[in-house]
Image (spheres, grey):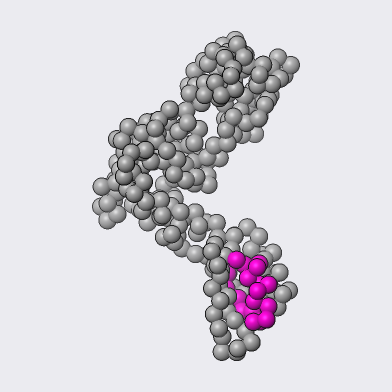
């Protein structure tokens, strides 16, 4: 039975559970459930702290899991990223009081407070910089005000919390993070999670694309299919009227209305957009 780790709380939890549900798996109905067995799909789900998931996967305790890319890299685990999931996006950056630290190179020799010490140490080492990394479990923004550090490194969304402490970001982002599917880096692990990977890929496809059907004059089909190339190629079928063909293709949800207008202007008719179910790629 495949063992999969799922975030038990936090910003990644609800989105992960919903994605697994759409992929056809049995998920928990009560947040107090810590283990859910899906006998039909031969899978067992373990609801764990997001920060611990990479460690469990890397050690082989579970076969796969969902966590943040930042948490994966910070953990130092041997687990590997399989695919990004399209939610839970965040930016990890350095910040300090304006005028005191202006560039990343200025961090050299200073104290850096963060909840992601592994990630920060690796970044500083990659730049050839030294510094004392101070690990904090929360409220990193107050570290400079309290005299604990000279610089902080943390997840930045709107920046409002930083500004309230008189801080400003500097330098390029350390990392662009989001939710990722991970697996162990042992022989056979890739094959073991292949079904899970295909199902999740199907959900992402269904969320990203819609099915577009339309009738098109045969003489214009090349121009029309340039507009709707599909994921691989569109399906073009003959019609009773030999001067026309029926075309079916998956197109991005975003911009579909503009695309429909362009097809209509080209001469296509009977244009229909349909949501697609989570497909098994």
> Viewer-proximal residue, 200 or 33?
200
Q: Position of residue 176 (x, y in %)?
A: 58, 36
Range of magenta residues:
212-229
Based on the picture, tell me whether residue 101 belongs to the magenta stretch: no
- Residue 216 forms part of the magenta stretch: yes
Q: Nearer the viewer, residue 156 or 196?
A: 196
Q: Quadrant of the C terminus?
A: bottom left
Residue 59 x %, y %: 32, 32
Picture layout, residue 153 above or below residue 223: above
Q: Quadrant of residue 184?
A: top left
Vertically, is 137 above or below 236?
Answer: above
Q: Is residue 268 left or right of residue 32?
A: right
Q: Is residue 281 visible?
A: yes
What is the x, y in percent for residue 226? Answer: 65, 68
- Residue for point 41% across, 55% down: 199
Please identify the quarter of the rendering in which residue 103 is found. Answer: top right
Q: Is residue 136 above or below residue 259?
A: above
Vertical position of residue 179 compared to residue 261: above or below: above
Q: Residue 220, how many percent across, how many down? A: 68, 78
Residue 6 in view here: no
Q: Is residue 137 left or right of residue 99?
A: left
Q: Residue at x 41, y 47 (%)?
A: 17
- Residue nearest the observer in this picture, 141 or 261: 261
Q: Residue at x 56, y 85 (%)?
A: 239
Residue drawn at 54 percent across, 37 percent down: 177
Quadrant of residue 279 in the image? Answer: bottom left
How many numbered marks does the figure carry? 0
């Amino acid at each position: 039975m495949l063992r999969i780790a799922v975030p038990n709380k936090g910003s990644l939890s609800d989105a992960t559970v919903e994605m697994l549900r759409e992929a056809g798996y049995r998920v928990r109905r009560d947040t107090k459930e810590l283990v859910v067995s899906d006998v039909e799909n031969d899978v067992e789900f373990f609801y764990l702290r997001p920060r611990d998931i990479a460690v469990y996967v890397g050690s082989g305790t579970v076969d796969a899991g969902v966590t943040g890319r930042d948490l994966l890299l910070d953990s130092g685990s041997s687990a590997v990223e399989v695919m990004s999931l399209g939610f839970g996006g965040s930016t990890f950056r350095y910040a300090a009081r304006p005028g005191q630290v202006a560039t990343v190179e200025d961090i050299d020799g200073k104290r850096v407070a963060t909840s992601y010490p592994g990630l920060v140490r690796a970044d500083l080492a990659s730049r050839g910089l030294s510094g004392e990394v101070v690990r904090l479990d929360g409220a990193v923004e107050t570290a400079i005000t309290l005299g604990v550090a000279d610089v902080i490194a943390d997840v930045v969304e709107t920046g409002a919390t930083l500004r309230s402490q008189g801080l400003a970001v500097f330098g390029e982002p350390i990392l662009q993070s989001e939710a990722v599917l991970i697996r162990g880096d042992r022989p056979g692990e890739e094959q073991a999670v292949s079904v899970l990977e295909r199902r999740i890929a199907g959900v992402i496809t269904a969320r990203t694309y819609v099915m577009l059907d339309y009738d098109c004059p045969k003489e214009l089909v090349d121009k029309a299919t340039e507009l709707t190339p599909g994921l691989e190629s569109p399906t073009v079928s003959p019609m009773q009227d030999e001067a026309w063909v029926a075309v079916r293709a998956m197109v991005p949800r975003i911009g579909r209305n503009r695309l429909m207008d362009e097809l209509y202007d080209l001469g296509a008719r009977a244009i229909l957009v349909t949501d697609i179910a989570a497909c098994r790629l």
